[in-house]
Image: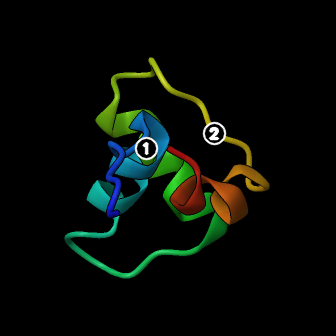
Amino acid sequence: MVTTRGMSEQAFFILTALVDAPLHGYGIVGEVKTLSSDRLTLRVGTLCTAPSTG
């Protein structure tokens, strides 16, 4: 049985931040903040777990 789950908002913004250019750490955090109009603020540690959480 295959189950699917949606992507978290954090993961969506992280992946969207990487569309134009490769970034790392604080670059991703800053781009996510800009893309979300300051609505979503990540910490660098979030980048390690966001892709695996749904």
In percent of width and height, residue 11 lies at 44, 51
Left or right, residue 39 beside residue 25: left
User: How far is mark 1 from mark 2, CA to CA?
Assistant: 8 Å
Classify residue 44 by image quadrant. bottom right
| Identity of the residue furthest to the right in this view | 45
| Identity of the residue furthest to the top in this view | 39
- Badge 1 crowding class, 10 Å Cα cut-off, few under 14, some 14 to 19, many 20 or more, is many
Question: Which residue is drawn at the image coordinates 57% and 74% (left, top)?
Answer: 24
Question: Which residue is drawn at the image coordinates 52% and 47% (left, top)?
Answer: 30
Q: Is residue 42 above or below residue 14?
A: above
Q: Is residue 51 above or below residue 42?
A: below
Disc 1 to disc 2: CB gap under 8 Å = yes
Q: Secondary structure at mark 1?
A: helix
Mark 1 vs 2, N-terminal side? 1
Classify residue 3 by image quadrant. bottom left
Left or right, residue 44 beside residue 10: right
Residue for badge 1: 32
| Amino acid type, label 2 | Leu
Question: Which residue is drawn at the image coordinates 52% and 61% (left, top)?
Answer: 51
- Badge 2 crowding class, 10 Å Cα cut-off, few under 14, some 14 to 19, many 20 or more, is some
Question: Which residue is drawn at the image coordinates 34% and 23% (left, top)?
Answer: 37
In percent of width and height, residue 19 lies at 22, 69
Q: Nearer the viewer, residue 41 or 11?
A: 11
Question: Where residue 2 is drawn, which disc sits there?
Answer: none
| Amino acid type, label 1 | Val
- Give the total of numbered labels: 2
| Identity of the residue furthest to the bottom in this view | 22
In percent of width and height, residue 9 lies at 40, 35
Residue for badge 2: 42
Q: Is residue 31 above or below residue 10?
A: below
